[in-house]
Image (cartoon, rainbow, N blue to C red):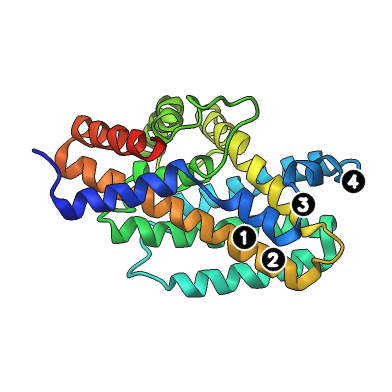
Amino acid sequence: MPLNDNDLQALRVAVLALEHPGLPARLAGMVGKPLDLLAMALPPGATQIISAATHKGLEAALKVAVLTMRGSPGTGSQLLHKSLAVASGAFGGAFGLSTLPIELPVSTIIMLRSIADIARSEGESLQDPDTALSCLQVFALGGNAPGDDAAESTYFAVRGIMAKSTAEAARYIAERGILEEGAPMLVRFLTQIAARFGVVVTQKFAAQMVPVIGAFGGAVVNYAFIDHFQDVARGHFAVRRLERAYGKDEVRREYDRIRQDLKN
């Protein structure tokens, strides 16, 4: 069954969000410098601290996704989530690298709750481990991994790369109902996400480190950060909703057609 006009428009908006993320350009515009140059100028040891904070944030988000979001009723305010992220960013912008191991997990959990509300609005049930893990997948869909080429960074390519680890992690959680720290399938799932999410985190932190940024700039950067992942989440869960309605093959055909049209 072909997509109706409203669903075709929803898919077009999703393609724009998922294939043309604007966060790097937005952050570069805020600070007036290319993010790659800023990232190269980070202080010694920053890469290790960012990597550790990224993994810590994702581990915390996984626990929230599996242990607390299942029974969370209703929907929250996207504006509230943005406000909380802004406050967290102001804290990080004021105190710099030393606060990242605290600020990033807080920001990641705030974003996850926002992503979960978007998933719920698109008809997803957070009782399903696959849905909860799909919320975490958004952090991978919103960034690129080092060494990615154009083919590997497309939305369906990233989903394909993560399909096996996501299915294994969902099956593990469904069977056990609990999280065991260090379980290989969960570690594999989070490592795949961290490889992509860490790139965006580095860009965010590099922007916050510009001397003129400070607390106010940190708040603005975090607003752009959560706004970016909310857009990616809306696109991701719109695609999943359409797949349930029309089938994966039909949605993929229309998605690829729209993506090609946008390139031409």
Report, in whole angstroms, how far the alpha carbon at label 3 lies from the one at label 4: 17 Å
Nearer the observer, disc 3 or disc 2? 3
Comparing labels 3 and 4, the label whose residue is closer to the camera: 3
Q: Earlier in the sequence, mark 3 or mark 4?
A: 3
What residue is rendered at 80% in x and 40% in y?
47
Q: Residue at x 35, y 33 (%)?
A: 260
For the residue labelled by badge 2, is the local secondary structure a helix, a strand or a loop? helix
Is residue 26 shown left or right of residue 158? right
Q: Nearer the viewer, residue 152 or 108?
A: 152
> Where residue 214 is drawn, which disc sits there?
none
Give me the disc on residue 89. Answer: 2
Badge 4 marks a residue whose secondary structure is: loop
According to the picture, the residue beneath numbered tag 4 turns out to be 43
Question: Is disc 1 placed on a helix, strand or loop?
Answer: helix
Placement of 67 over or under 146, stated as above or below: below
Q: Report the Cα–Cα distance between label 4 and label 1.
A: 22 Å
Please state which amino acid type lies under the numbered disc 4: Pro
Tell me, for residue 107, which label it has, or none. Answer: 1
Q: Is residue 178 visible?
A: no
> Which residue is pictured at 50% across the width and 25% down the height?
152
Q: Earlier in the sequence, mark 4 or mark 1?
A: 4
Q: Residues within 10 Å of mark 3 (few under 14, many from 20)?
A: some
Q: Nearer the viewer, mark 1 or mark 2?
A: 2
Q: Quick one: label 4 or label 2, which is nearer the N terminus?
A: 4
Which callout, 3 or 1, points to the residue nearer the camera?
3
Q: Residue at x 83, y 58 (%)?
A: 210
Q: Position of residue 137 (x, y in %)?
A: 46, 42
